[in-house]
């Protein structure tokens, strides 16, 4: 279990990477930005985490519905390891269906297809981060809601 504080959430994709951030108390996640995937991503994530004084980086782990690792799972594990090598605490969090949930949220908010494409990754990152924050609060004996 970690100490409460600000956390950064990551939804890593092959093209775009969604980033979300929690409040100072580590209670509420909010979408922050979208980064292009590619070379130097771990360094960019570490820079953002330090800039916002985050104590933990939560990387979404995209396991298959059968709970098996996929190519995306391995990519997320490599990213987490690279971020950890930047000197940051990293947690992996099951992100199954977070992108689908983000899409439903955006459709419900009336976003057009192009707007959804721009926002989906950072919304998914906030869903991943919020799930992790709620689990941390529950583990400390707090109310998850």
Image: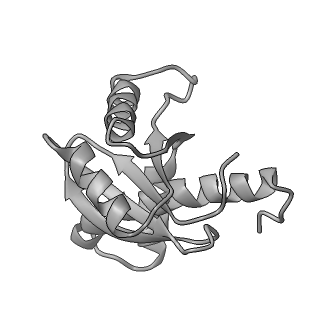
Residue lying farthest to the left in this orientation = 39
Q: Is residue 37 left or right of residue 77?
A: left
- In this view, 73 is above or below 35: above
Q: Whole-percent x and y of residue 99?
A: 43, 52
Is any part of residue 28 visible from this angle? yes
Which is more toward the observer, 114 or 94?
Answer: 94
- In this view, 70 is above or below 4: above
Q: Whole-percent x and y of residue 67?
A: 57, 24
Q: Whole-percent x and y of residue 136?
A: 70, 53
Q: Is residue 56 left or right of residue 71?
A: right
Q: Is residue 125 left or right of residue 82?
A: right
Give me the residue at 77% from left, 69% from top: 145
Q: Whole-percent x and y of residue 36?
A: 17, 53
Q: Quadrant of residue 93?
A: top right
Is any part of residue 103 visible from this angle? no
Give me the residue at 38% from left, 43% from top: 87
């Amino acid at each position: 279990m970690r100490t409460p504080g600000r956390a950064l959430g990551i939804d890593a994709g092959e093209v775009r990477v969604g980033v979300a951030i929690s409040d100072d108390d580590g209670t509420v996640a909010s979408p922050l930005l979208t980064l292009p995937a590619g070379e130097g991503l771990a360094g960019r994530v570490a820079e953002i985490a330090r800039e916002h004084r985050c104590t933990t980086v939560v990387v979404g782990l995209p396991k298959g519905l059968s709970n098996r690792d996929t190519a995306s799972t391995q990519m997320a594990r490599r990213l987490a390891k690279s971020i950890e090598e930047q000197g940051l605490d990293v947690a992996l969090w099951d992100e199954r269906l977070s992108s689908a949930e983000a899409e439903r949220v955006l459709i419900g908010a009336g976003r057009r297809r192009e707007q959804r494409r721009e926002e989906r990754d950072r919304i998914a990152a906030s869903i991943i981060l919020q799930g992790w924050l709620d689990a941390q609060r529950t583990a400390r004996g707090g109310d998850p809601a």
